[in-house]
Amino acid sequence: MRYRRRGLDIVSHGLLILALIAFCLPVWLAITAATHDQASLYTGTAPLWFGEQGLDNFRAVLTEPVSRLGTDASRLLFNSTVMALGIACGKIVIAILAAYAIVFFRFPLRRLCFWLIFITLMLPVEVRIMPTYKVAADLGLLNSYVGLILPLIASATATFLFRQFYLTVPPELLEAARVDGAGPWRFLKDILLPLSTTNIAALFVIMFLYGWNQYLWPLLITTEADHMTIVVSLKRLLSSADNLVPWQTVMATALLAMLPPVAVIVLMQRYFVKGLVDAEK
Amino acid sequence: MATLRLDALSKTYPNGFTALHGVDLEIADGELIVVVGPSGCGKSTLLRMLAGLESISDGELAIDGRRVNDLEPAERDIAMVFQNYALYPHMSVADNMGYALKNRGVPKAERRRKVEETARLIGLEDLLDRRPKQLSGGQRQRVAMGRAIVREPKVFLFDEPLSNLDAKLRVQMRIEIRRLQKRLGVTSVYVTHDQVEAMTLADRLVVMNGGRIEQVGTPMHLYERPATRFVAGFIGSPAMNFLDARRSGDVLTLPCGTQLASPWPGEAGETRDTPVCLGIRPEHLAIVPEGQNGGGTLAVRVELVEPLGADTLVHARLDGQDDLVVARIDGIQPVAEGDSLILRPDTDRLHIFDPDSGQRLDDLEPACHTPTSPA
Amino acid sequence: MATFQHHRITPWLLLSPQLAIVAMFFFWPAAQAMLQAFYVEDPFGLGRTFVAFENFARVLASAEYYRALGITVAFSAGVALGAMALALLLAVLADRVIKGATAYRTLLVWPYAVAPAVAGVLWGFMLDPELGLISAWLGALGIDWNHQLNGGQAMALVVMASIWKQMSYNFVFFLAGLQAIPRSLLEAAAIDGAGPWRRFWTITFPLLSPTSFFLLVMNSVYAFFETFGTIDATTAGGPGGATRTLVYKVFEDGFIGYDLGSSAAQSVLLMGLVGLLTLLQFRYLERKVQY
C-alpha cells in the first residue's frame, strides 16, 4: 500500500516489542525469584537471572505443606480446578437450557422470566456479598465445593450470550426440524448443540478464567485449608510469615496459580477472542 | 397421495392483524396448485398454516378428509421445501435427507437405501457425503427437494423454492420440479410471487390479494377470463392495459372518441350510460397499416420503444388516459419514439370490469379458446 | 421468530435450574441486603431493631464513606483511562504492522488470564521496598518507594497492577474494532492528503467510539469489583485507608467490623451505582443497534 511509511513500521514494531518486554517483566521476575532460596534472594534486589534451586521450590510447594497453610499447593490447585470446572460447566449447562427456553418457546410469564434472569447481569457477587454469605452459611455450604461453585453460577452472563447466539439461528432451521418430526429435545440435541460448539468453547474459556480467578467469594466461604483455592492462598502466604516474606515460595505458588488459566487462554485463544467480541454485541 | 380441503381458513395474529380472511379451496389428489400474489397477500401464511408452522385461527384444514388443525407439522405427513432451503449446516447431505426418517425410527439400513434411491432420482449420488456449505445454490436446492421426496409424504409444500437461484438455473429447476411432481404424483402446493413460474408450473392457479382468494383456475383460464381487475393485472406480462371508458348498451366509448363493440351488453333493457374499466392485453393490440384506418381503432403517439428481439413493446400516449398504453408488436416492425400509430384492439378479447369493485362484468366462461380442465 | 408453541411444561423444565439458583443466590440475598439495610443488629446477633433510614444516614454522613467514594472514583478513572489509552496505542501499532498483528495479540492477551490477586502479588514483588527491582530503580532516581507507608504510592501500585491485567482485554477489543474499519476509508483519506496522525484522529478514532464506550463501562465495572483481589493481596485497603474502595469498605465493615446494617446500606447504595452504570450500558447497546 502506497500510503504506508516504512519508518513508522519499524517504530511500531519497536514500541510493541518494548511493551511486550514490559508486560513480561513481572512474570520473568517471578520465575527467577522462584528459582532462588531465601538467603540468596535477600542479598540485594530481586535477581534478573535464575538461581540454584531449579524447580526445587515448585516441587516443595506441590508436595509439602506450604508455610502455615497446613496444605500443599497440589491440593490448592485441585480445589481451584474443581471450582473453575464446576463454574464453567455448571454455567454453560444451565445457560444453554435457560436460553433455549427463552428464545425457542412461547409461554406465559416468559418476559418476567427473562427479566428475572437478566437483571442478575447488573449486580456482581461482590455487591451482595454479605447476605449471599449468610445464605450459603445457613445452607451449610461453608467449606464445600458446592458452596464455592453454586452461588457464582447465579449470574446470567452465559445465558445472555447463548440467547444472543440463538437469536442468530435462522428460524427456518427450527421449522424444517419440526416438519422433520423433531421435538424440543431432539432439536436441541441434533441441531442446536452441534451448531453451538464454537460458542460453548468460547464460553468455557471465559467462565473457566472467571471461576479460577475468583477471590472474594472463596476467601469468605473457605475457612479451612482443605477447600482453599490457590489464588486465595497467596494472601495467607504473604501475611503468615514471621518477618521476612518467603518470596521464592510465594512466587512459585503464584506461578502455579497462573499456569492453568494462561495455558487455557493461549491454547484456546481463537475461541476466547470470538467469545469476548461476540459478547459485546 | 392425498386430497386437501381448506374450509374458511382464517388467520388473525394476537396483535389483531388478520392475514387470511376465510380461504376455501379443494385440492385434488396429485394436483399441483400454485398460490401466487404480491408480497403480503397472505400466501406464505397460508402455506405455513398447511404445514402446521402457524396455528389456524378459524376454519378447518383436512388432509384426506381428516381434520389436522391441531396436529404438529410432523404428524401431518407433509414435506416442505424452504425458500432458503433450511439445510442443517452441520449434517452431510445424506444425514440432511435422512433426518426425518431417523426421527420416525426408520432403521439405519432402510434409511440409507431410501436416501440413495432418492439421490439417484434427482442426481445427487456423488454429493451424499458433502456438507451444505460445500454445495452450489442449485445443488442445495436439489438437496432440499430430496429431503422432501425421501419421506414419501402425502403433500409437498414449496415456499418460493427457486427465488434464490439465478435466472437460468431457475428455468431448469422449474422444469425439473414439474417433471418430478408429475412422476411422483404427490399433491403439491407451491407458493411464489413469480407469475411466469406460476403459469408454467400450475395445474391450477390460486391468485391471492389482501388475505383473500381472488380467483382459482387453470393458468389459461385466468389469462383468458380474469375474474377481477386485480387478477387481470397480475397475470400476464407486460401487464394488461386498463382504459377508462363508458358503456351504453353494447357500445363502449373511450374519452378519445373511439367506439368499440362491448363484449357485455348489460342487463336486459338497460340503456343507461355507465363508466367501466376496459382491459386490453398488450398482445391484443395490433398496428393498423397506414391508410386502412377504419372504426374501432386507437390513435396514439409513441413515447418509448423496448425491443425484446422477437417482440417489441411500444409505450404510447392515448388521449384521455392517465397511463401509457402498452402494445406488444412484432419485433421487425419499425417503430420510433415520436411516431403516430393506429392500434386496433382484438374485440373478441376485451375485458370489462366494474370500475369500483373491480369485478369482471362479462361472462366468466370464455366463448372461445377454452382450455380443457386439468387431467 | 419460530418457536415451539404447544409445550407447556418443557420451557419450565428448561428454566428451572437457572431460576432456582438465581432465586436462591441472587434474589434472596439481594432482598436480605435490602431488608438488612433498614435494621441494626445487636453485636451478638441475637436480635435486630428496625431503624428505617438510619443506616443510610449514618453511611452518608460519614467522612470515611466519602473518602472511599473519592478513592474509588480516582482508582477507577486511573485504571480505566490508563488501561484503555495503553491498549489503544498498542492496538493501533499492532494494526499498522499487519504482519504479526495476531502474533502480538497472542503475546499480549495472556495477562487477562491472570487472577487480579496474582497480578497484585507480582507487582507487589516488583515494587517491594526491600527486594523490588523497580523500587530499586526508583530509589536510584531519588524516589523513596514504600507503598506500605505511602498512601499515594500504594494507590499507584494497585492502579498499575490493575492496568497490567486489564490492558489485554481492551487490546483484544480495540484490535478487533480497528480491523473492522474498512481499509478503503483510510486509503481514501490518504488520497485526500491526510497523514497518519490526521487519519487516526479524524477517521479511526471516531469509528472506534462505540468500542471505546463499551470498554469504558466494562473497565469501570472491573475497577469497581474485580480489583478487590488486587487490593486485598497487596495493600489490604491501606495504608491508613488510602486504597479502601467502596467494595473494600463493604467487606471491611461487614466481615471485620461486623457492622451488618451499615455494610448492607452500603451494598444497597452500590447496587444503585452499578444499576446506573448498567443503564448507561443498555442505552449504549440500544444506540449501537441503530448503527
Image (cartoon, coloured by chain):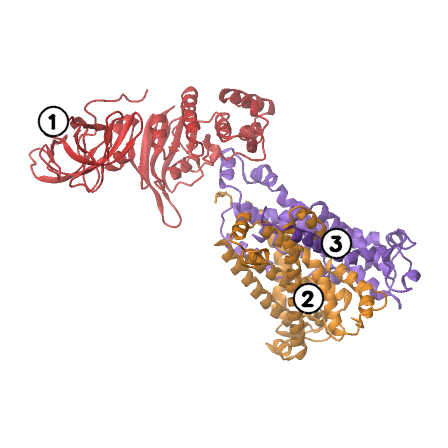
Given the image, on which type of amino acid does mark 3 rest? Tyr
Question: Rounded to the nearest whole Å, what is the CA distance between mark 3 and mark 1?
Answer: 104 Å
Q: Chain of mark 3?
A: A
Residue C82 lies, in percent from the top left, at 66, 63
Q: Secondary structure at mark 2?
A: helix
Given the image, on which type of amino acid does mark 1 rest? Gly
Q: Is residue B69 above or below residue A202?
A: above
Residue at label 1?
Answer: B291
Q: Secondary structure at mark 1?
A: loop
Residue A28 lies, in percent from the top left, at 81, 55
Query: Could one spot residue A116 in this view of the protein?
Result: no
Identify the image quadrant of residue A143: bottom right
Q: Is residue B230 left or right of residue A229?
A: left
Nearer to us of marks 3 and 1 is 1
Q: Chain of mark 1?
A: B
Query: In this view of the protein, which residue sits in the foreground, C283 or C22?
Result: C283
Q: Is residue A255 above or below residue C273?
A: above
Q: Residues within 10 Å of mark 2 (few under 14, many from 20)?
A: many
Whether discs 3 and 1 lie on one chain: the answer is no
Q: Chain of mark 2?
A: A
Q: Secondary structure at mark 3?
A: helix
Q: Residues within 10 Å of mark 1 (few under 14, many from 20)?
A: few
Any idea which chain is the purple one in this picture?
Answer: A
**Among the two numbered marks 3 and 2 on one chain, the one whose residue lies closer to the N terminus:** 2
Hue used for the chain lettered C = orange
Residue at 29% of width from left, 35% of height from top?
B234
Question: Rounded to the nearest whole Å, what is the CA distance between mark 3 and mark 2?
Answer: 19 Å
Any idea which chain is the red one in this picture?
Answer: B
Q: Is residue C195 left or right of residue A16?
A: left
Whether discs 1 and 2 lie on one chain: the answer is no
Question: Which label is found at residue A145?
Answer: 3
